[in-house]
Amino acid sequence: MAWADHHCHLPPAEAAAVIAEARAAGVEVLVNVGTDVDDSRRAIAVAEAHDGVWATAGVHPHEASGGLDGLEPLLGSPEVVAVGEAGLDYYYDHSPRDAQRQVFAAQVELANRRDLPLVVHSRSAWDDTLAVLDREGMPSRTVMHCFTGGPEEAEECLRRGAVLSFSGIVTFPKAPEVRDAARACPLDRLLVETDSPYLAPVPHRGRQNRPALVGVVGAAVAQAKGLDAADVEQATFRTARTFYGLDREAG
């Protein structure tokens, strides 16, 4: 068995060392996530250089003001397995909300048109996130990355066919609603991630996160669900490979 960290941000200069540490921790699949066009190019370059590493190409809501020029050609790269991360972030509002919604909707359309998975970022914006997905049509493979809602939001996402992904937040003492959502989420509709270098799980808070810690997240999900960590490891590894089509890709 092995772990999959399906959502991380690998620093290009340190990628080799970070990937080697992850391998030593039993992490065999890493998906390196792009946050704008230039960052997506860097994510692809890292994936090209390392076996077992794939990339996404997308524009994060923080970067929505910069638009999508140059994004679609990147989706044809063999290393790119998803569109995103895309979505809405009303907590920071680094880009105007109208621009966020427009850029998010355009990326939903891209995912649908190219039959690619969609990686969704939603923070303090559940109603509008779901409204955009409903209007544009939820892609058949959609993951709500770094899920921060509770059971009600989980139910709404699951009802639409999404997969829920849990990060180090599931270990935070002040996030009982996230653990409740993990408990309610069917095991075959669940993924784990680090979102590294952010959101290091307890007991590593205050330090830089890294993909090698995805097993800590998985163990916390297992505890919330009353399962063995090996059950979560096996299920999420299988789901990640199926969700991103990795059994048909070379990475």
Image (cartoon, grey):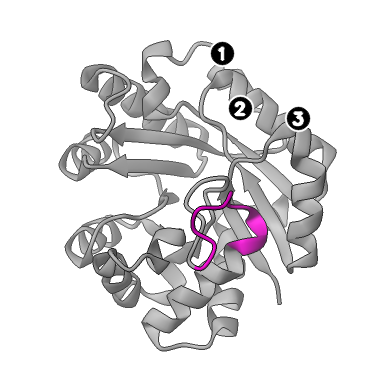
| First-in-chain label (2 vs 1) | 2
What's the residue at 46%, 26% (across, down)? 59
Q: Bin the neighbour count of mark 2 within 10 Å (Cα to Cα): few under 14, some 14-19, many 20 and up.
A: many
* Residue to which mark 3 is pinned: 45
What's the residue at 56%, 70% (across, down)? 216
- Name the spot of residue 190 as percent of width and height, x first: 44, 66
Residue 208 is inside the magenta segment: yes
Secondary element at image label 1: loop
Q: Bin the neighbour count of mark 1 within 10 Å (Cα to Cα): few under 14, some 14-19, many 20 and up.
A: few
Secondary element at image label 3: helix
Secondary element at image label 2: helix
Q: Does any portion of residue 251 appear in the rendered image?
A: no
Q: Which residues are magenta?
A: 203-213
In the depicted structure, whether residue 220 falls above or below residue 122: below
- Name the spot of residue 134 as percent of width and height, x first: 22, 41
In the depicted structure, whether residue 143 falls above or below residue 224: above
Label 1 near label 2: C-beta < 8 Å?
Answer: no
| First-in-chain label (3 vs 2) | 2
Most foreground residue, 89 or 208: 208
25 relative to 88 in the view: left or right: right
- Name the spot of residue 85 as percent of width and height, x first: 46, 36
Return the mark for residue 49. Answer: none
Q: Does any portion of residue 138 appear in the rendered image?
A: yes
* Residue to which mark 2 is pinned: 40
64 relative to 126 in the view: left or right: right
Residue 155 is inside the magenta segment: no
